[in-house]
Structures are given as structure tokens and as C-alpha cells.
């Protein structure tokens, strides 16, 4: 297992022992797109486990280590569940193999469960599923390449790219101040835009950072229907 931060101290101590009578516990969550969505929770253990107020039911389930190759494919893991009772295959048949559905894998420790602490927690999506008489194997990817925003930043003329009230935006009028604005419409001149936020800062008596902090690029030329730019 690669080094991870924020490991519960009690689990970290157990990890370093030469022998222990306690155990590590793998938990799995799989979402099925019913209406409303249903989240099934399983534990690779002979008895149910309650974690963060949710009950994880015993089920024959396991997963592989994360695999990478030299062909620039995205890292994946294989999640395997028993198909002996044919319960899971019926769900796959009804919901397109659950492709695209979210899956969460959690590693915790017996001693960390009372405090709802975990050692490892990762969200995946099902990329593909295959089944035989014994097993169902779902290939999990850690993110959807086609849903990834690329590039992460876009230059637009009159739309701010900053996250409202983050360090780049800089709007910091106290929420108790009568001139505080709870929303931004990401525009320069709109009713809740950057220029109006500058007025809010002036009225509140704080540093006036707007509209100078506007995250758009008004100097970008705009195509005209006549064929020119302005």
C-alpha cells in the first residue's frame, strides 16, 4: 500500500505491530440507477458492519490492485463478486451492466470503526462488466476521461473563471454586513456581477478588489455576424 496521509492513529499503530488480534475491513458501495437511486453496501466479512451510520452486508466480494500499462490507458481495478446465486446478474441485465455507475471502496480498521475513521477511500465508476457462471467482474476507473474538463481553464470574454470567494476571486465582505452579496453571476456588468461586487465592497468599507479581480478577458475579440470582430 502506498503511503497515505491522515491515517487514524490507532490504525497506524496496528499497522506497525508484528502481530494483532484485530482486523482490517474492506467496505464497498455500488449505486444502482433505480428511481430514486439505490446504494448497495457490502463488506468482505462474515458479519454485518455499521460504519458512518450505514449497514454493510456480508457478500462474496473482492478487488484487485490498481493496474497501469505502458499504452497510456487510465489506471483501473477489477471488482469481483460472486454470481453463484444469480442475484447480481439480474441487476446487470436490467441496468445496462451498471456501466457509468459510481462505486466507492473503503478500507478501515476494526478499532477505527467507532470513530468513523478510514484509512483509504476512493470513488470509481464502472467502465465495463463481464460475467460467467461463477463471477461477475467489473472494471473500475477512477475518473471518466470523457467527463473531464480539458483544459481546466478557459479564457472567455465576459465570464469569470474564478470560484466565488476563493483566493483568486478575493471577495471577502463579512456575511453579517448588510452590503454582503451571497451570490455572483460570473459576469462583469450583470445584476450580481463583478462591478456590483466592487460597489458592495465600497459600501462595506473593505478593500475594493472588484472589478479588477474579474476572471474573464474583455480584450478578447468577439466575432460579428458581418464577418468582422469587435
Image: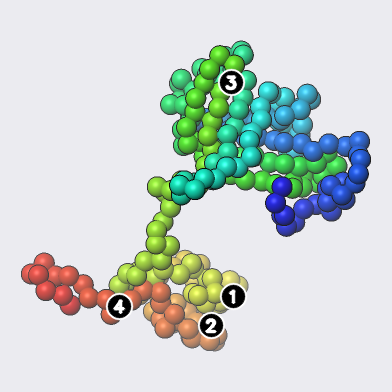
From the image, tell me which residue sits under label 1.
174
Residue 128 on image: x %, y %? 47, 32
- Picture quarter containing residue 45? top right
Residue 96 on image: x %, y %? 43, 26
From the image, tell me which residue sits under label 2.
204
**CB under 8 Å between callouts 1 and 2?**
yes
From the image, tell me which residue sits under label 4.
218
Who's the residue at 22% across and 75% down the image?
A: 221
- Judged by depth in the image, the label closer to the viewer, 3 or 1, is 3
Precedes in sequence: disc 3 or disc 1: 3
Who's the residue at 91% across and 36% down the image?
A: 21
**CB under 8 Å between callouts 2 and 4?**
no
Q: Quadrant of the C terminus?
A: bottom left
Precedes in sequence: disc 3 or disc 2: 3
Callout 3: few (<14), some (14-19), or many (20+) C-alpha neighbours within 10 Å?
some
Mark 2: which secondary structure?
helix
Precedes in sequence: disc 3 or disc 4: 3
**CB under 8 Å between callouts 3 and 1?**
no
Precedes in sequence: disc 1 or disc 2: 1
From the image, tell me which residue sits under label 3.
135
Q: CA distance from mark 3 to mark 1?
A: 57 Å
Who's the residue at 91% across and 40% down the image?
A: 19
Along the horizontal axis of the image, is 62 left or right of 14?
A: left
- Judged by depth in the image, the label closer to the viewer, 3 or 4, is 3
Amino acid at each position: 500500500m502506498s503511503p497515505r496521509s491522515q491515517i487514524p492513529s490507532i490504525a497506524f499503530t496496528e499497522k506497525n505491530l508484528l502481530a494483532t488480534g484485530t482486523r482490517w475491513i474492506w467496505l464497498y458501495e455500488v449505486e444502482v440507477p433505480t428511481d430514486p437511486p439505490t446504494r448497495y453496501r457490502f463488506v468482505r466479512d462474515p458479519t454485518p458492519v455499521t460504519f458512518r451510520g450505514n449497514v454493510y452486508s456480508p457478500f462474496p466480494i473482492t478487488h484487485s490492485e490498481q493496474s497501469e500499462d505502458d499504452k497510456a490507458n487510465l489506471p483501473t481495478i477489477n471488482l469481483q463478486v460472486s454470481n453463484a446465486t444469480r442475484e447480481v446478474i439480474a441487476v446487470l441485465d436490467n441496468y445496462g451492466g451498471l456501466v457509468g455507475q459510481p462505486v466507492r471502496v473503503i478500507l478501515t480498521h476494526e478499532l477505527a470503526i467507532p470513530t468513523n475513521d478510514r484509512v483509504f477511500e476512493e470513488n470509481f465508476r464502472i467502465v465495463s462488466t463481464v460475467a460467467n457462471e461463477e463471477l461477475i467482474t467489473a472494471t473500475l476507473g477512477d475518473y471518466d476521461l470523457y467527463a473531464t474538463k480539458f483544459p481546466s481553464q478557459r479564457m472567455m470574454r465576459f465570464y469569470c473563471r474564478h470560484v466565488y470567494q476563493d483566493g483568486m476571486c478575493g471577495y471577502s465582505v463579512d456575511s453579517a454586513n448588510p452590503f454582503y452579496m451571497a451570490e455572483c453571476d460570473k459576469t462583469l456588468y450583470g445584476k450580481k456581477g463583478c462591478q456590483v461586487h466592487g460597489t458592495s465592497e465600497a459600501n462595506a468599507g473593505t478593500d475594493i478588489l472588484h472589478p479588477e479581480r474579474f476572471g474573464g478577458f474583455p480584450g478578447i475579440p468577439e466575432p460579428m455576424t458581418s464577418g468582422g470582430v469587435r
